[in-house]
Image (cartoon, rainbow, N blue to C red):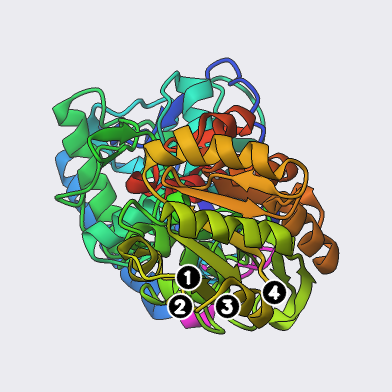
Amino acid sequence: MARIVSRALPFASRSHLHLSPPLRGAALLSSTPLLPAAASTASLLSWRGFTPTPEPSRFAQPFAGFLAGIRGFRRARRGQAAAKREPPQDPTPPPPPKESEIELCARISVEDDLPDDVEVLNVIEIMKLNVPMAMKIALDGLLEYNYKTRDTSISDVGKYEKVEVSVLLCNDNFIQNLNKEWRGEDCATDMLSVSQFIPDLDVPTLMLGDIVISVETAARQAEAKGHTLLDELRTLVVRGLLRLLGFDRQISDEAAMEMEKEELLILKSLRWKWKGLAKNAPDLSKPHTETLGGQVMNSLKRAGSLRFYRPKFKYIFCDMDGTLLNSKSQVTARNAEALKEARSRGVNIVIATGKTRPAAIDALNMVDLSGRNGIVSESSPGIFLQGLLVYGLEGREIYRNTLNQEVCREAFLYSLEHKVPLVAFSQDRCFSMFKDPLVDSLHEVYHEPKAEIVASIDQLLGTAEIQKLVFIGTSEGVSSTLRPYWTKAIKERAGVLQAQPDMLELVPPATSKGTGVKILLDHLCISPDEVMAIGDGENDIEMLQLASLGVALANGAEKTKAVANVIGATNDEDGVAQAIYDYAF
């Protein structure tokens, strides 16, 4: 008689799984159900206590009542199976077989890109016990299987000294790549079983194979079923073991029923929860897609999933108008959620905008992203007014640049003469020479400080240092009249920017957000290799070029998209969120 002892090998904190092509007789299996067949009675497996330590040990007292219950449960199954068998022809009982031990080895590991999530690490500690327990039940059941559809290549494990299985926890990206490489299906599944069993190989160790589980998909399924991640992972481990033992629910409806029956039996015998498939669970045989604005996006990562990925970048520099803000100048709930989740995973979000700092704070306050616990505040780093004001640690000013006063005077004279609204930006304040609905729109729509009306140009120039000027008109008027005129008029004394189609900005020469980003990175001792940048306008070009990954939104200027590494969705399609989910982790 063979006794099973178990051994849970200490899980490797990180595992680079490079599965070699399957050996002869090995098979790659996906997570859909399988089923058992008739089992050999050449050996009899009995229970023995177990411990998660590297060496097998005798009965562990805390599990005495639990294992005794399992013994009784299994005896009932054996009794039913024995009743169906014909009585032996020879009434003389055979001599009892010599007792031997079969050691169970379960190796739990974590794929390298899966971060140290507290819940997952806690689950792994429990799985060190749970996997050997499930192996004992499943292998003991081999003697009692009367299923028609199970592949019986593995039936008698009594001839082995050791049975080994490995469990790898990973995220959707990893398992999707395995599916693509091994099965030719570019999709993420909850679990894959990779058999290492070679029939007729006379060796002392039975290597069942590898069970690869996406904890990201498992977490989604657990939520859909209304139970815990541990419950779902236990179910997937049992399912993976059954597949390695010859069950396959994909071959027929009967096979699916048989595998589900045995899966339920094992889970009940271990007193683990089982809820089957969630009614509204996604079809995991197909790629996960999301529909947004009528467009289908093949995006695996989504809200709540970033905890299963390591950040690729320490910093994300993000523009606001036309990028983080939609066409209504609002931060959408999905964009806000993505920023919060990225920040919770250790990514620093830095606003790089043409706006004033108060405007950025006001816009982000609406989605609870401002203040000391948000991504922008008076005590956080940031780049404002096209890089003309840069704030470093604790929100202290580290760089400022101002516009030539003569250029300012000429611009206001032009504004008064042609009745074109013009707003001067000076740190946290805005000024104008006359009231106009377009001037008010900067405050009402774009969150800028309400413009202060001044009586004369001299008074304005004597009141504050001006960082930039913004003409406001129509898109046609800006492109056909204002831009050509001021490009020629100011020559090298100032620069011309067009961040919005209906606005023209006059700024100091060589102004760029890229310059502001570089100044801030030097201040923070951060390399551009650790930065991802997202923008849309011509004023974002240098910033996208400087970053390791530059993402231009689809609504952006053609010049901007030409220099970007990636073109994302539009600002009305939550382009920032999609960029974070697709590229930041």
First-in-chain label (3 vs 4): 3
Residue drawn at the location 69% of the way across and 59% of the way down: 387
Q: Nearer the viewer, mark 3 or mark 4?
A: 4
Q: Is residue 397 left or right of residue 118?
A: right
Q: CA distance from mark 1 to mark 3?
A: 18 Å
First-in-chain label (2 vs 1): 1
Judge by depth and name the residue closer to the eye, 158 or 275.
275
Amino acid type indicated by mark 4: Glu
First-in-chain label (2 vs 3): 3
Q: CA distance from mark 2 to mark 3?
A: 15 Å
- Which residue ends up furthest to the top in the rendered image? 24
First-in-chain label (4 vs 1): 1
Task: Write down the residue under mark 3.
Answer: 428
- Is label 2 in a helix, a strand or a loop? strand
Judge by depth and name the residue closer to the eye, 142 or 567.
567
Give, as a single range, the part of the protein colored magenta.
48-62
Amino acid type indicated by mark 1: Met
Q: CA distance from mark 2 to mark 1?
A: 5 Å
Q: CA distance from mark 4 to mark 1?
A: 16 Å
Residue drawn at the location 50% of the way across and 64% of the way down: 423
Callout 1: few (<14), some (14-19), or many (20+) C-alpha neighbours within 10 Å?
many
Task: Write down the residue under mark 4.
Answer: 465
Provide residue 222's location: percent of width, then percent of height.
31, 59
Cβ–Cβ under 8 Å for marks 2 and 1: yes
Say if the magenta span includes residue 195.
Answer: no
In the drawing, what numbered circle is on residue 433? 1
Q: Is residue 37 left or right of residue 530?
A: left
- Is label 1 in a helix, a strand or a loop? loop
Query: Looking at the rendering, which quadrant does residue 544 occupy?
Result: top right
Observer able to see residue 81:
yes
Amino acid type indicated by mark 3: Asp
